[in-house]
């Protein structure tokens, strides 16, 4: 009973852009033992690891232990948790995934990277919502002052010149950050944005990866060696 549920959950976590109907392409590869308890007709399954779930396409999920709740359709993972596929990587100390709304909540030394876009987010906690019906794009919300490293996209298909600031990553700190897909980034609360050739401050900011555009709102200030804009 527990293995099909685990595979469905695991696939949805590791490959949030794909449908859960392909959950059969995942396998529980490693675990020490499992214990099942039934209460009010619903099962709770405790999985002692280290556990490893591997999916077609290279996706893997690891943790020291996990608990499956059939009643709420949730899986709780703890201890060196990692979700990795060819495009994304997330590590944390704890994670809870809700199958019903596609929500992954990770806490404890969270590091989330989009390997195709060169984006890395670090912080104490992260909510990640996979794309599904009614939510066409993935969404991520980080609080407790996360730190974002964002590599610029090449313009007109050309690489940045060696040593040019245009090729450097942008470092962002804020009280709260929201990401929609891999194109729009929003920061709120004591926003600080830095690159070697400038630093910017505001209460709110928006970074548009498609148009390579930065918008600052409320108490905005941009400083460089030869300018100071307010």
Image (cartoon, grey):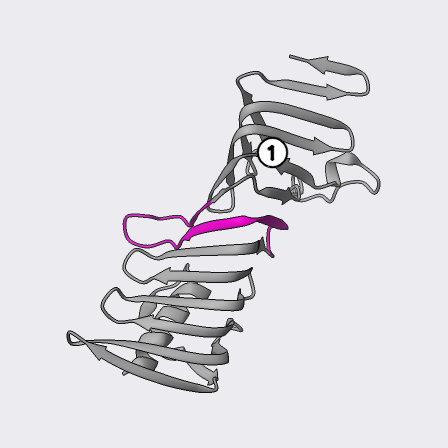
Residue 84 shown in magenta: no
Q: Position of residue 170 (x, y in %)?
A: 68, 38
**Residue 84: in sight, yes or no?**
no
Picture quadrant of residue 89: bottom right
- What residue does disc 1 label? 212
Q: Position of residue 139 (x, y in %)?
A: 42, 47
Picture quadrant of residue 72: bottom left
User: For the image shown, how many numbered marks are present on the structure?
Assistant: 1
Drawn side of residue 101 relative to residue 217, left or right: left
Q: Residue at x 47, y 84 (%)?
A: 31
Q: What quarter of the picture does the N terminus occupy? A: bottom left
Drawn side of residue 22 relative to residue 106, left or right: left
Q: Is residue 65 above or below residue 142?
A: below
Q: Is residue 149 above or below residue 63?
A: above
Nearer to us in this view, 37 or 87: 37
**Quick one: which residue is furthest to the left in this view?**
40
Range drawn in magenta? 115-141
**Quick one: which residue is furthest to the bottom in this view?**
33
Nearer to us in this view, 7 or 213: 7
Q: Secondary structure at mark 1?
A: loop
Q: Residue at x 51, y 46 (%)?
A: 182
Q: Residue at x 66, y 25 (%)?
A: 200
Q: Tell me the crowding category of disc 1: few under 14, some 14 to 19, or many 20 or more residues within 10 angstroms, Cα based.
A: few
Residue 129 shown in magenta: yes
Drawn side of residue 24 relative to residue 178, left or right: left
Q: Position of residue 68 (x, y in %)?
A: 33, 72
**Quick one: which residue is furthest to the top in this view?**
230
Q: Is residue 15 above or below residue 191?
A: below
């Amino acid at each position: 009973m527990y293995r099909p549920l685990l595979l469905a959950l695991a696939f949805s976590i590791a490959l949030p852009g794909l449908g859960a109907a392909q959950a059969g392409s995942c396998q529980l590869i490693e675990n020490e033992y499992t214990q099942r308890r039934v209460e009010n007709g619903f099962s709770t399954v405790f999985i002692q690891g280290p556990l490893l779930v591997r999916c077609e396409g290279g996706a893997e999920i690891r943790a020291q232990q996990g608990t499956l709740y059939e009643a709420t359709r949730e899986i709780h993972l703890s201890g060196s948790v990692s979700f990795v596929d060819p495009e994304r990587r997330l590590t944390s100390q704890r994670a809870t995934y809700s199958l019903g709304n596609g929500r992954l909540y990770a806490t404890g030394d969270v590091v989330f990277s989009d390997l195709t876009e060169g984006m890395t987010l670090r912080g104490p906690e992260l909510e990640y919502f996979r794309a599904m019906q009614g939510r066409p794009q993935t969404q991520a919300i980080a609080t407790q002052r996360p730190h974002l490293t964002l590599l610029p996209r090449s313009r007109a298909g050309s690489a940045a010149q060696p040593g040019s600031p245009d090729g450097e990553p942008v470092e962002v700190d804020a009280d709260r950050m929201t990401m929609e897909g891999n194109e729009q980034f929003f920061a709120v609360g004591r926003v600080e944005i830095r690159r070697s050739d400038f630093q910017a401050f505001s209460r709110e900011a928006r970074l548009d990866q498609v148009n390579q555009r930065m918008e600052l709102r409320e108490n905005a200030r941009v400083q460089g060696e030869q300018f100071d804009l307010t």
